[in-house]
Image: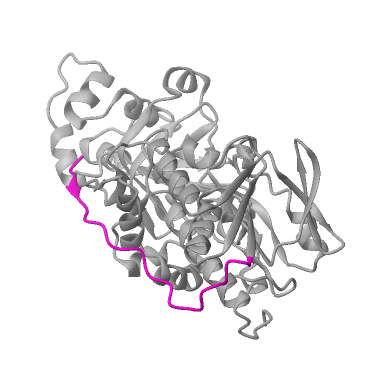
Amino acid sequence: MGRKRMQGADVPVYNGPMSSPDKTVHVIGAGPAGLTAAERLARAGVAVVVHEAMPSPARKFLMAGRGGLNLTHTEPLEGFTGRYGEASGTVAGWLQRFSPTHLIGWAEGLGQPVFTGSSGRVFPRAMKASPLLRAWLGRLAELGVEVRTRSRWSGRRDGGWVFDTLDGERVERPDAVVLALGGASWPRLGSDGGWRPWLVAEGVEVAPFRPSNVGFDVAWSEVFADRFAGQPLKPVALTFGEVTVRGEAMVTRYGLEGGAVYALSAALREAVERDGSATLTVDLRPDLTIEQLAGRLARPRGKDSVSNWLRKAAGLSPVGAGLLREIPGDLPAGADKLARRIKAVRLTLTGVQGLARAISSAGGVRLDAVDDRLMLKAVPGVFVAGEMLDWEAPTGGYLLQASMASGVVAAEGVLDWLAGDGRTGA
């Protein structure tokens, strides 16, 4: 993977009203969105308390970083914002306040240099989330942010916010609150969507949760699943509708997952939910044209087995050759027809994996339920950030970037609110 050093930039300066130190804001949820909001608020002079129900902060962030923490992407902003689908207009506004360049500068300011891979994805040079998180929590401590773990928000009572802690129930009355409780994916890491009933009871519109960045069911033969589950298809190009994505897919016992699949997952999910199935086209040799591939396949096979011949002539891995044989009927006769099959293997996706297996979730607080500061229109003084909001994006840095950017927007909204700008969420 090609690498080049990315030079950081300063985090954008907040030019709005600063707060007096006697103001207290509580942030509920210690994931990337919540910690970003806490940092921005503390820098503005607010006393900040962060509540986290789990025994330690940012567990999903740490899990995501096990294979190399993808911070953001260097795609030009016009294309970048298009990754957010129907929410692209809203997210574009967030990225004006905290862009990929700002995120890179923020990470490097924590002593975590980054690099850009040949795919355009940006990673910390350490390729782990834990050093970055340790530095981040250290900075928050220096800013006076108090992080309370095993502090689970359980609702509101008599104008106070109720938390269940190891020392019993605790009622807090902050000047404002930022909710950053995550969506409903990976519930064992703390994001279970349990906040939804309270917000609905408060008159907040919440869209149903659906899995995003998730795998899809394919009815593999038992032989194929036994032999190839856990093996990657790479490089491949996946096409659904008018969109083609190059990358990697992973064969699983239930079907197919991986980065290239996730990039199409929103459209595929809609099709499967609407029609009961979706057809995904797999190009097993995206680097060759049909004519180039046919030319190679026209060479004499000799005494090679079919699998060896496909490996030598077409450059197919064993799992790629096995995928060809999953298509009903014999392999096409003739180099041209076989080349066309290799370039367009049609797979029928019959189902979507659930939220517990999804990397992220769609749904949540509808974007028209918050104002441009991300304050709930139905509950003044309460702001929402991160995956609680109804937006989705593919993996590749787009999820983390928007989550942190929304934390910046929510924090600056809080500061405007505390300064008494007169707006009530309309």
Give the residue displayed 31% in from the left and 35% down from the top: 234
Give the residue displayed 21% in from the left and 30% down from the top: 315
- In reply to whether residue 336 is colored magenta, the answer given is no
The residue lying toward the viewer, choosing from 30 and 306, is 30
The residue lying toward the viewer, choosing from 213 and 221, is 213
Determine if residue 60 is in view.
Answer: yes
Is residue 373 left or right of 237 when viewed as pictured?
right
Q: Quadrant of the C terminus?
A: bottom right
Is residue 8 left or right of 412 when viewed as pictured?
left
Quarter residue 248 falls in: top left
x and y, in percent, of residue 103 in the image? 36, 57
Is residue 183 left or right of 15 when viewed as pictured?
right
x and y, in percent, of residue 47 in the image? 59, 60
Give the residue displayed 67% in from the left and 79% down from the top: 425
Q: What main secondary structure does the magenta stretch of the protein show?
A: loop
x and y, in percent, of residue 341 in the image? 32, 40
